[in-house]
Image: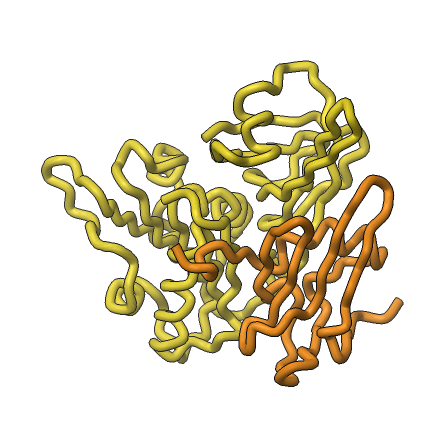
Chain colours: A orange, B yellow
Amino acid sequence: MSATDLALDGNAAAGILHAVYGAEMTLAVGTCDGCGTAGPIGAVRLYRTAGLVLRCPHCDAVLMKIVTAGERVWVDSRGLRALQLAAG
Amino acid sequence: MKTIILDVPGWPGHRAGQHADIRLTAEDGYQAERSYSIAAPADGERVELTVEDIDDGEVSPYLTEEARTGDELEIRGPVGGYFVWNGDHPGPVLLVGGGSGVVPLMAMIRQRGRVPTTLLYSARTLEDVIYRDELERLAGDGLDIHLTLTRSQPEGWTGHSRRVDASLLAEVAAPPDQRPLAFVCGPTPFVEAVALALVELGHDPGLVKTERFGPTGA
């Protein structure tokens, strides 16, 4: 089994992303800081480790890491150059 | 595989393809949370989830083996807007499911209205086909159903018997120039293969929506 066989979609993070950003985020468009590709967060690769790791489906660079522990959530989104979503 | 039905007071309703997240908390405070596809269209405060047994899972074994009528669960949802059929796509719809990947697709079929829809459903054997009776009943009237049984076929089987590949997709799906909106759901290797084949056939990658279940399943 390759690592790709373990991948899920960004969809699987819809709930935690909604809790963090207070909005539906799977249709938000993220731009990868590695290769510049833009696409909906619902379509990126997601790996479940100690937390969630979202990777670019084109260049495999890490876009976001999300770790929940107790009542706190840590979000590292430095792999996203931009995040664009419906205003309001 | 088990279907569990939850009564969720205040549930706001959902769209076909959306998820619900279930969170379990152990006595020591350890929490585990997983996302499940909702199997049926909105029906008041009733939420139907179809859960696959996963031996080393943190949440599924509880739902399939331990949970009893009357237990209370922490649920968050509905969530997700990406793998959702809004009914506003002008062209036909193509649904491709592997194993239990048919679950969210069934929610879409049940609310499709008159949209021309093709379902290509891959299962190991005829016994593994979920919703068989309902699918037989719903076929026709703009709903084309193609089953492929990849491991064994009953005597006299006239359906397909090979894995979903580009030639099978070309045979059953609307051609790329009709711009079908495709939803592909199933185990990760299945979804990878189908999505790649659709793009190779000339379908617009932006019209191919995927939902991977991970390594288990069909």
Q: Between residues B45 and A26, which one lies in front from this camera angle?
A: A26
The residue positioned farthest toward the bottom in the image shown: A36
Vertical position of residue B135 compared to residue A30: above or below: above
The residue positioned 65% from the left and 60% from the top of the image is A53
Q: Quadrant of the N terminus of chain B?
A: top left
Q: Is residue B27 left or right of residue B140?
A: right
Q: Position of residue B179 (x, y in %)?
A: 46, 74
Residue B112: percent from the left, percent from the top? 52, 51
Examine the image and state in which quarter residue B7 appears: top right
Q: Is residue B142 visible?
A: no
The residue positioned farthest toward the left in the image shown: B156
- In the image, residue A37 lies at what x, y percent? 62, 82
Is any part of residue B195 visible from this angle? yes
Q: Is residue A74 above or below residue B57?
A: below
Tell me the residue at 58%/27% (across/down): B63
Is residue B20 depicted above or below A61 in this figure?
above
**Residue B181 x/y as whole percent:** 49, 67
Residue A87's quadrant in the figure? bottom right
Point 60% across, 34% down: residue: B58
Of the pair A51 and B191, the residue shown nearer to us = A51
Which residue shows up at 40% across the image and 80% down it?
Answer: B177
Q: How many marks?
A: 0
In the image, A71 versus B34, the foreground residue is: A71
What quarter of the picture does the C terminus of chain B occupy?
A: top left
